[in-house]
Image (cartoon, grey):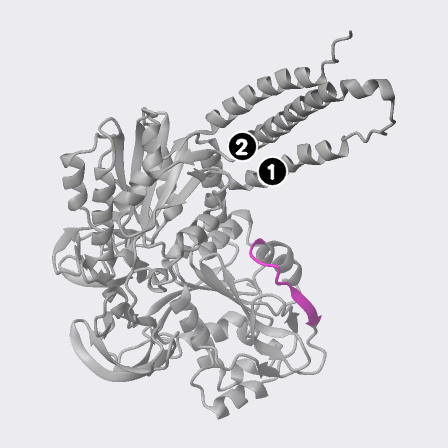
Amino acid sequence: MQFLDPTFLIGLAAAGIPILLHFLRRRRSLRIAFGPLRFLRPTQERQMRRMNLHRLLLLLLRIAIIVCVVLALARPTLTGGLARLVRSGESSSVVLLVDSSASMLAQTAEGSVFDRAKVEAQRILSQLGEDDEVSILLFDSSPRPLFEEFLRPGGLLSAELAGAQARPRKGDPLGGLDAALDQLDRGTMAHREIYLLSDLQKVDLDSTELDRVQRRFAQAEATNLYLRPIGVEAFVNHRVVTVQLPATLLRTGQTAEISVTVGQDGRSPVREALLLRVDGASVGETEVSIPPEGRGRHIFPLTLGEARDLGLELRLRPDRYDLDDRYFQVLSVTDRVPVLLLRGMLEAEGERDPALFLTTALDPLGDGRGSFAVRVAPARAFDVMELPLHPVVIGSDLRDLGAARLAALRDYVDGGGTLLLFAGDPRVGLYLNQKLLAGWTALRLGDYRGAEQSFEHLEIVAGDHPIFEGLEPEALETLTEARLQGFYRLDESEGRTLLRFAGGGGAMVELSVGRGRILVCGFDTSTSAGDLPWSPMFLPLVQRMVGYLATVGQGRGQRQFEVGETLSVEVPMNRAAPATVLLPDRTRRPATLDSDRLPPRAILGEADVPGLYTLELGHEDFATVAVNPPPSESERRFLSPEDFAAGLGLGDRVAVRALEGGRVEDSVRQARRGRPIHSWFFGAAFLLLLVEGLVSRRVLRPPPTA
């Protein structure tokens, strides 16, 4: 016998109250010798013995009443062989919820962990009654019912379960439980059961979704949740952790450094073979030393060819969880980047015009054939439809864009665009603080230093940032020698400060906004603001800033995806050729062109497996995207059923029980054949209360008078 609410057993201490009262209410009599009563003593002694027996019986009855009530509140349940003595006759609506996420693809001696879970699910099916109705749900990032309706246990369910496959996706147990409750709502039985079979890999739970699932369980009456942990054999897992590419524009003929980090969870140092493949061809191989439970790093040099997307694949020797032994990445070699330059101060001319030096820095030869294709437009009159066509927008002394253009610029950055903002004119401060920046961040332009004051120098704060990384010390010193005047000091409490004025305050601050990025400079690029435009470092500084922004915009030209996401690639408006997708297994499927978006996008479909997917337009390779399994599934942190249930927070909302032990059939049989008998104890307490009433009347009734 077990108790579903054992906390109430603390109330058994109340059984001592009648005993305490019994001793406190005992009467102490004073004996006085009285001769004539000596003949009545034998009769009196017989009556006292009889009364003491009644009082003892009354004490035991009161103790038994308290014990029965407390035991009833603790919800006693018969289990095992005793449960067969009680027959409930209840049938159940049952949902088998089987984890099919990436971590379940780890290999064991008998196959994958998912294969073991399917065997366990078959054994649970064998213990269900003929009158039960059953549904089987697989869950990873989304639930997948094997059948939309409930079926009776039998060969059809078993056959469908045997053919089920796991997918290399992130696990979402909350989504699985939510779908199981939806399925149970379509059931016809009063009693409801959910059997969750999983390796119980630890995942981050969304607090809003968790609260919603908890409320649903609180409203789900007569629902039991059984947890069956699928054991994972211990092994040392090696994995590719990250692949870091240069955060700058990569051009033909350059040599890029591909930084690869690999890790392991073993307790001994190892040397692991690492292979780099580019477009299917091996270009580098090495051995990486990995410390115990640590990470190792290696940098591959790669000489870039023509401008296109290069598909990279990093490989380790396969282990029992081979999904993270490969990592895919795309290296985009670019010839020209479209840049939209918005001019704010149209009345400025010649060397006082900030746009003059910006366009010269981005197109030094002035022939339009450089690394950047610059289009200059007035800030107050630019076409908002042009924004999505440019991965980088430069704003020079912006003011009064108008409500429509301001909203379009905000949507552009929130969706993944990037903005390089220069602010050096005293007329822009109020507008930028109250209108433009206020829509994104708490960063504000601070004190303004007028042009009539003395010059000030720059200090490099983030020398490891991609904008400055790799520059020679002499070049960095040249940048700090530039003199500026007429600028705003930026608040350094928001974002990341990259440059600072020698007298205090930020000169360049980087912000992450939505899926996009903003670089705010407190100075402009005209000669009226100092001699920075004449510095030898001005051209490389501007090109590095724009090149960096062109590589970090997450919504424009995205090339990295996770398994399960829908793949899409931006295409030019004039490329309406038939679109196909070359899959990792070298087969092809059609892609869909979404011309309603600007710029148009080719929808490659949902990614089912890791690998490199190539978009072909008119039988020519146009773009490549990389798909990897979720990294969280490689952490291999498994919870006990108790910790898993505690994380769900369902203990006070639903009966949660772990089905542990060698044979799941025995655990299910014990769990399902347990019969609640709390009503027995309530009934016994009621009968004992009636008996107590009769006995107490007998004890307290006054003796008959002579």
- Secondary structure of the residue carrying tag 2 is helix
Q: Out of 541 and 556, give the one closest to the viewer.
A: 556
| Residue in front for this viewpoint, 683 or 699 | 699
Q: Can the viewer see residue 698?
A: yes
Q: 355 above or below 585? A: below
The mark found on residue 206 in the picture is none
Q: Residue at x 35, y 34 (%)?
A: 82
Task: Point out the residue furthest to the bottom here.
Answer: 474
- As helix, strand or loop, the secondary structure at mark 1 comes to helix
In magenta segment, residue 405? no
Residue of label 2: 73
Check the image and report above or below for 603 versus 535: above
Q: Position of residue 537 (x, y in %)?
A: 49, 84
Q: Is residue 444 magenta?
A: yes
Residue 206 screen position, x and y as percent: 46, 49
Tell me where the magenta segment starts and ends, as one range: 439-448
Going by the picture, which residue comes out furthest to the top?
706
Q: What residue is rendered at 58% in x and 56% in y?
A: 436
Q: Residues within 10 Å of mark 2 (few under 14, many from 20)?
A: many
Q: Is 448 on the left-hand or right-hand side of 178?
A: right
Q: Earlier in the sequence, mark 2 or mark 1?
A: 1
Q: Amino acid at mark 2?
A: Leu
| Cβ atoms under marks 2 and 1 closer than 8 Å | yes
Task: Name the mark on residue 11.
Answer: 1
Q: Nearer the viewer, residue 703 or 634?
A: 703
Q: Nearer the viewer, residue 410 or 496?
A: 496
The answer to whether residue 672 is seen in the rendering is: no
Q: Residue at 43%, 76% (x, y): give it.
A: 543
